[in-house]
Image (spheres, rainbow, N blue to C red):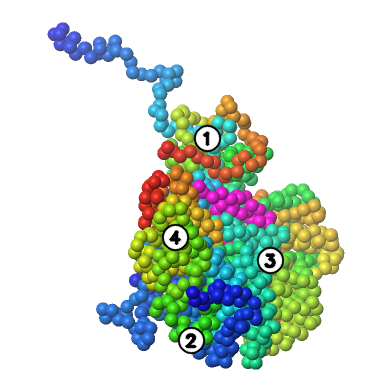
Amino acid sequence: MFYMLLRHRDVPDINQIDVYQKNGGFDALKKAIKMDTTDVTNEVKAAGLRGRGGAGFPAGVKWSFMDNNNWPHYVVANADESEPGTFKDREIMESNPFQFLEGISIASYAVGANAAYIYLRGEFWEVAHFLDEKIEEMEKAGFLGEKIQGTDYSLKIYTHLGAGAYICGEETALLESMEGKRGQPRVRPPFPPSQGLYNKPTVVNNVETLTSVPYIISNGADGYRKFGTEKSPGTKIFSLSGNVNNPGNYELPLGTTFRELIFTHGGGIPDGKSIKAIMPAGASSSLIVANDEALDTPMDYENVRNVGADLGSASVIVVDDSIGLDWLINKTMSFFEHESCGKCTPCREGAYWMHQLTKRIHAGEGTKEDVELLKDVATQVQGKTLCALGEFSTMAVVSSIERFPEDFEAKV
Amino acid sequence: MSKEVKLTIDGKEVTVPAGSLVVDAAKKVGIDIPIFCYHPKMEPAGMCRQCLVEIGRPAFDRATGEPVMEEGKQKINWGWKLETSCTNPVSEGMVVLTQSEKAKKGQNDILEFQLTSHPLDCPVCDKGGECLLQDMTLAHGSSESRYRFDEKRHAQKHVALGESIWLDRERCIACGRCVRFQSDLVGEAVLDFDMRGAKSEIVTTSEPGFDSVFSGNTTDICPVGALTTANFRFGARPWEMEATASICGECPVGCNTMLDTRRDAKSGGKVIVKRVMPRQNEAVNETWICDKGRFADFSNADRVLEPAIDGKAVEWTEAIGAAAEKLGAAKGDAVFLADGSLSNEDLYTMKVLADAAGAKAMLYSQVGGGALTTKSGSYGGSGAGDVILVIGGDLYKEAPIFWLRAKQAVDRGATLIVATEAETRLDAFATTVVRDLAQGLEAAKKAFAKAENTAVLYSGDDALAQSCADLNPKSLIGVWADANTQGAWEMGYEAIADLSALKGKTVYVAGGDLLVAGAVEAADFVVAQTASMTEASQKAGMTLPSQTVSERDGTFTSGERRVQRFFAAVQPMGEALPGFIITAQIAEKMGVTLEGVSAEVVFADLAEKVAGFAGLSYESLAVVDAEERLSIGGTCYENEQGLGAQLSAVSTN
Amino acid sequence: MLVELLRGLKTTFKMMIAKPVTIQYPEVKREVRPRYRGRHELKRYDNGLEKCIGCALCAAACPADAIFVEASENTDEERYSPGDRYASTYEINFLRCIYCGYCEDACPTEAIVLEHEYDVTFSTRLEAIFPKDKLIVPVPSNGKVTPQQTEPGTFTRSVPEMKDPTK
């Protein structure tokens, strides 16, 4: 089993700097800082690395959007990881931190940043302390700090903790939070590569995205493209959870089917139940009916759309037939109502309204009109919000009512 | 010349400067897109999502940059979702639809969301009748609600934010206008949101609460009844009141106001002033007034109701006769003493009488150097490259709107030098702060040398005024204590700062109660022409009741030398007469004929005789042409009564 | 000839013995219909609190400008109505009133109701203006007189919870 990102499963103790160095660690960084910065960006562009935080935006393209008339530049690693069902970044940071830090360093070099930040969710304070130690080790070994490896390039990496808000995983809300303000998204445009942290050009990338960068530099775009599909190259860590026998993180090439992930690696559904629905992007997904067509769909950014969902952060939650979807959407709506930042009207009021409806329906006090109203309200929120939280909060609701009407007919 | 952009909104073509917002461009062709969080005087926030419209942009080929054609015309790429018109700047060839099916549904949907937890308070809410949410719902919303009444959120309804403002958290629609006004526009971030999501609420972050002299303005811009003033609580319904234009009499800025009046049962059926509201005048106060003016006391406590000699009430004819006799007899020992609370007409009539009678016309003012200020003009609109010096006093306490203008000038790039002995609230915005006045003058001298537009706002004696004048600024503005002190300077009144100099004189004093009390203490005999009296001032030998600003027509000259009209809003109390009429009647008895009926005629005379007022008349002061009417979704009144006029510069002799 | 005379007087004699339709007003008053629009009354709740919240919507709706309302704030020591606001001044000028009932339609709390009294008289213009104490109904038997002293925290909703009229 080849591991590009979860290397600790091959090489135990790779979170110790000497072990990491013995296993090819920092070779990519050493190579990159001797390259032209545009060449580094182009290599990542050519490799087709797509953002692993959920949006799937090509990382190299994002780096090339940085405004070169506005300095200084910053790189921010988004370690907020608050999507329900996502737990991949934590494993990377705890078990293979140096590859992550190396990825940040290469990205910073490519965009000309001399300061990089890791924004971690507030609940990750232990992880943050751990990363602080690793950064110090890296500095001592001469891979961070002033004049790295005898070049003119200097870089310092800092960790920054959030305070328990899912919305701070949205990149502009994250930047607001880092600046000490309320964590609420900004109006976009302008986007962070032109005006980001303190209104300076900033690249915000997910932890997994940055951890993929060293492999690309060491093995080239072609080496990276050996895995995955043409439009979605590389490997992805799938966080499998829900009604499966073996939940956990699985690093697989993009294009692996749902069936392989859930049944081969995940060990199938426990207690003899059968699979009913799949949520490929955590709580923000549309639910896919788990029929054969869906199970045989390759998991990449294009094919999942064909079955009516988005791959997102690939936090695959499996739902079996013992779960009533009225209960499920009540859970997701309770989450989104709690996490809505309250800045824009449709999400703030819409999430509250939808939650009142799901509560009623789940308690058996709803009517058929209530279910229709719920779907209508969810549709009404779509397309009007300031950021994606409001948009995605409606996905599970609309898809459940449309694709699994029996669950709701039973409750009214 | 700034670049111009042409776009089409609802089929109408409009050309606006580049960088304008779609919502502003729409207003130019008379299309009112519904808004809540947008305000033309603040940066757009894009929070409420009410201004959703369909926007299409002309298509260009990504690779070649050539326009993509379709059926002979350039193809329009429509956004896949509705966009907020307040955050989108215009672009060439843009096509906007504000009333299409999709846009109308979007606007209706957002209103439905706003109304879900908004309480059914219209009958008891002070904002009812002037509420933006009500207006938007009638224009763009539905009449039926799909939301269950008992699932509505509840929150605190009667929260005191400081002493003057009540907050109702249930009504708040989280538009953020109040927070942005305080932190961005005024620079005093005393309000903020607390908690998140549906639990968001407004809190005050200062101790004492809502510690800002501009707090009342948030009740104007709040689109619902969440922020209301305590002094007007449940006062009257907006449609029950009549609005009359006036000028605030609290300080020399001369903010344009509207006095809302109504018949009042509690005061025996008289028409009284229920509240003070701002009136738009971009050159003076934009759309704001400070709390000193907004919460000014119109209660008419201690009003003088009838003429009196030695404390005994008499008829007007008797009082006039006795006053004329006393003043005539005093000859050279007579002093006509005024303060800046009198109107231009009052001051002028007094001055003419004083000159004719060979008596002195004196102005009581602690701030000196008025004669030096007659060259100056307004300093509003300062920006990059300009320098402002504020020296001697606390502008925040003395003339808050001047303070706000200075702060906004700094936002636009002006240099601000603050030279005061004590700390002031302007320090935080100043480029340079010195605690010694002489140093301040030095610093200003250096800065003025490199600047185009310069202004000095001073609060001090003649010597300070002279030092400031020596800097040769474009505008020299004295921060007087009263609204019309500038008018008195223009007419040539002599300054007096220490009233003990009145010893042995017969004084005809016209002005506020404090002035009268001071004169009573110092002078031999006092004829007091005043509106209110307290124990100290009642000892005057003769009392002649005069009317207040809200009871008559007249004009004030602001500290920036701008003449503005105010109008009668209520009936006079008791037997009070306008000041100039009293003076004219006394003059008649003393053998001097002066206009004693119409304020307009007095002003016409004044305009002929006093340099600086040349060419002005009541008619010219009532012109409202050039000002842009802001559709601001707030309760600031549009100005239909007059913008006033700037006095022409007069050389100092 | 006699026959013709009797035939002509038939109706007269019939009427002589028929019961008269005249109602002996004012000793006997005819019943008015339930929705008859007579003089206004300001209603109270069963606990004695006034229903009127001083919103002046009746004054706004009145086509004859016959109503004058001034509102004031309730305190727990001196409470007139549930909620924040009550009408401290309420006057109806019956020379202006046209008994249309628009005020009754506009009232959000069913406080102003046109009752059945139609014989409203006065001899001067001033007497035609009925102040609140002539319009308000007496306190019901299980209620307390207003102003009342109430426990803080009991009447916090500014508009009292209304029952759904369609149910």
Q: Nearer the viewer, mark 3 or mark 1?
A: 1
Label 4: element kind: loop
* Front residue (pair B182, A23): A23
**What secondary structure prevails in the magenta region?**
loop
Q: Nearer the viewer, residue B246 or C8?
A: B246
Please report, as a chain letter, where disc 1 is located.
C
**Any mark on residue B622, and which?**
none
Say if residue A271 shows up in the picture: yes
Q: Disc 4: which chain?
A: A
**In x, y percent, where is residue C46?**
55, 31
Question: What residue is pinned by disc 2?
Answer: A220
> How many discs appear?
4
**Left or right: residue A99 compared with residue A137:** left
> Alpha-carbon distance for marks 4 and 2?
36 Å
Residue B101 is left or right of residue B71, and the answer is right
The residue tagged 3 is B251
B580 vs B91, left or right, is right
Would residue B114 be counted in the magenta stretch? Answer: no
Callout 3: SS? loop
Residue C42 is tagged as: 1
Residue A268 is tagged as 4
> Do discs 3 and 2 share a chain?
no
Q: Amino acid at mark 3?
A: Cys
